[in-house]
Amino acid sequence: MKKFLLLLHENIEALENLSPKEMEELGNAHFAWATKLGEKGHLISGDGLQDSTTKISGKDCIIKDGPYIESKEMIGGYYLLQAKNLEIVIELSKDCPCHLWGGTTEIRPIADYEEC
Amino acid sequence: MKNAKNKIAFKEIEISYRKQYGKLFSALLFQYGSNYINQIEDAIQNTFYKSLKSWKPNQVPKNKENWLFIVARNDLINQIRKETKTVATLPEIKIGSKEESQEDLRLKTILLFASTKNISTRIKVIFVLKNIFGLHIKEINESTLINSDAIYKSISRVKKSFQPNEFARFTQPINIDKNAINIVEEILYAVFNIGFDSFNSKNNSIVNDDICLEALALAKLLFQEYKRKSTSNLIALFCFHIARISSKQDDNELVPFIKQKDNWNMELIKLGFHYMKKPNKLNRYYIEAIITSKHMTTEMFDLDYWNQITELYKLLISITESPIVKVNLCYCLHQAKRTDEAVVFLEQIENQLPENHLYYSLVKANILRKEKTIESGEIINNLLNNVNQEIRRKHIVENILPNL
């Protein structure tokens, strides 16, 4: 079984402007999707991420705090999934509620070179 | 493949964010006053966003209302701190701590809005839709057909009309006059009607049943508090309408009134009759409740029936200027084969409703069907160009167009 990190690049502006009803529906959609993944044994974990971010760069450890307002998209959450292959994860991810409000999902296989 | 450890029973959030919006808004308004009304709105929006980020199927707070309240209050406190640079006077509350008050202050808030002078009832309805029923501007626009700019202006006008620090006085008794209660009834009636006919293009539901149910709940609270016959009749009217909500739509199709009967909620119809009270003087809600109850109990929709209903609508017209009541009267006159009279009323209200008003257009097209077939067809075609909800479009194309 391989592991995959599903990154949710969310459209922050769209999400922040959702009505209460839309927010509730989006929450329920994530609940339902995560539950389905869990029932099929694909879900290892998942979390939403806060908008604040801190970047540390270089040997001098320069610290820069975000969020960076110039970007419309931000990684707003992740799911750690497991499946036999990437194709299965692609199919599962098509239904990710992140896409409902202009978001993009990105699948990153967890490096496991022993299986190569 | 199956991993029992990862199995999670699906459970919805099970809390209405629209209802919570009104509860949070009222509670924070009464604690912090109208000076912070914009910050309160932002705090609630931020809170829902935070719940979206942090609630998971196996990690939902036990007391969701309390969680929402504490997070919203802390968010508001942080905003106030940043703006006023006060630190010590506004302590944050830890999530999970027991909140002292979960009192539902929505009705009290509406009563105070209703008492606000120099603001029209229409504007008050918009404000209540946004801040008590948790509708966004775009949803109010879709529900009322009032354009977004006008809605923004209305809301801004209400905010400016509040005195500094108004509402932050919840410990003091509030004197509510009779007129304010009348206005609250009007507001709830308007809100209910908006919920009863949803035109939201994003979903295929023709009813916002949560809005209708909350309007009913608040009307019941109003009745408990003031025991007025008019409120009782308003509740009766709501009960009759809510009794048929689930029968109005079958999957993705509208169900004509005549075919809905088998799926009506009889308990609610009984409750409707229970709340009907003969008023001392003519009352709009009482007459509408009579009309609706007759629609739901008559055996025959014959000429006698339509003539009776016509008389009731004429009574209504004597006490209200609503153009929708006149559209209903037109429909009844036409059903009673009194089309000439119907046409006279149609002309009177032509300019009182927005262009391509759905119900008006349908009634007019139906009335003109035999005498002015081309005009009737044009009305429906215009309507089809403007209806943005697929389920309604489908109904017109499949059920109304073929009969013209």
Image (tube, rainbow, N blue to C red):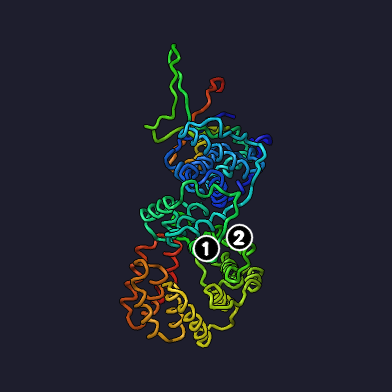
| Type of amino acid under label 2 | Ala
Q: Chain of mark 1?
A: B
From the viewer's perspective, is residue B193 above or below residue A41?
below
Query: Residue visible at 36% across and 63% down?
Result: B386
Residue positioned 58% across, 40% down in the render: A34
Position of B96 compared to A20: left or right? right
Find disc 2 in the rendering and name its residue.
B217
10 Å crowding of disc 1: few (<14), some (14-19), many (20+): some
Splitting the image into 4 quarters, where does residue B3 fall?
Answer: top right
- Whether residue A49 is visible, yes or no, is yes
Q: Residue at x 54, y 38 (%)?
A: B50
Residue B107 in the image, given as x and y percentages of width and height: 57, 57
Q: Is residue B336 left or right of residue B221?
A: left
Residue B244 location in percent, x, y?
A: 58, 68
Vertical order, A18 against B340 (above or below): above
Q: Secondary structure at mark 1?
A: helix
- Circle 1 sits on which residue? B180
Give x and y (percent) for residue B133: 52, 54
Quarter in which the N terminus of chain B is drawn: top right
Q: Label 2 crowding class (10 Å Cα cut-off): few <14, some 14-19, many 20+?
A: some
* In the foreground, B38 or A93: B38
Nearer the N terminus, badge 1 or badge 2?
1
